[in-house]
Amino acid sequence: MKAIRYHRYGSPDVLALEEVDLPVAGDNDVLVRVRAASVNPLDFHFMRGTPYLVRSQAGLSRPKATGLGADMAGRVEAVGRNVTRFQPGDEVFGARDLNERRRGGTFAEYVSIHQDRAVLAKPANLTFEQAASVPIAAFTALQALRDKGRIQPGHKVLVNGAAGGVGTFAVQLAKAFGAEVTGVCTSRNLEMVHSIGADTVVDYTRDDFTRTGPRYDLLVDLAGNRTLSEMRRVLAPKGTLVGVGGPVDGLWIGPLIGPAKLLALSLVVRQTMAPMLAHNSRDDLVVLRDLIEAGTVVPVIDRTYPLSQVPEAIRYLEHGHARGKVVITV
């Protein structure tokens, strides 16, 4: 089969489309013929091996696992003898755990995944491309709002970075929880963010959301482009700031600086400062599938690329201006 592989850290130029062995479905695995996958920031972090802390898991001098990609949607080709959840022909979607990366990524024609991981029957109302765009980004949005932000009906919620892959899910999920939602984005994305449910949309190139508007019960920061003191100005006295992602500069700890600052600040202020790192969850995928099937959440896709153009897709995502998700068709 064909799959994207990399054997050294670096820019997207280190990625190559190679002919590799077809993965084998173990006793508890499903072998999926991948129809679509999506690109996430974790892909370029593993590709580049930065921040260097990533290499403590991925390999110090060169990657231990040579495949990339976590999200996928496709059709079950074969099942292991102990598999009871799926059968050949089922259309599925889900995400591979990071600890399964040595078994190959989802930027490939086939992938083998344990049946108990975050994989479910694909919603019938989604294309394969839409379904593949859901897991990692939607997990992040759901867990930021519900688990870290403790969102409640009637809360005033601000999403900074509302037009990105995680942001488009965060806006829709916050509305599903009954919140009043403000989205922050650039002028070219105002209409789109409003169309997916934001009550108010702020163009950060024209208006400074940290100096105007109401105070928010929950602020989900996906952009990392404002200081903590600026964001605390618009946070309610007992509000919560959830930090997800941010600038990727810095070779050693890079994006980890923000979470460290949040943890330190949380010791001395009344407001809740909550960094987070999303995790795969089959239960959360069930929640998301139900919302998608009800039409409450609809994936937003910016661009699609064929498998051979994964380097270009990652390069585009790294620029930081993707509008929704970037998807790979297989």
Image (cartoon, helix red, strand yellow):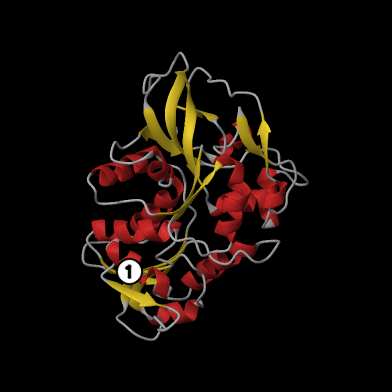
Reply above or below: 306 against 140. above
* Residue 218, quarter of picture: bottom left
| Near-viewer residue (306 or 93) | 306
For the point 37% across and 33% down, the residue is 120
251 and 199: which is toward the camera = 199
Quadrant location of residue 102?
top right
Instruction: Name the residue type under label 1.
Output: Glu
Question: Residue at 64% across / 64% down in the picture?
Answer: 254
Residue 225 vs residue 106, the one in the foreground: 106
Task: Judge from the rendering whether residue 27 lies leftward or rightward of residue 203; answer left or right.
Answer: right
Up the image or down, 238 lies above or below 31; here it is below
Please give left or right for residue 39 compared with residue 83 in the image: right
Residue carrying label 1: 191
293 shown above or below 28? below
Figure check: 321 above or below 140:
below
Give the quarter of the figure containing the N terminus: top right
The reply, left or right, for residue 194 in relation to residue 205 is: left
Q: Is residue 228 left or right of residue 9?
A: left
> Can residue 167 be seen at all in this image of the molecule?
yes
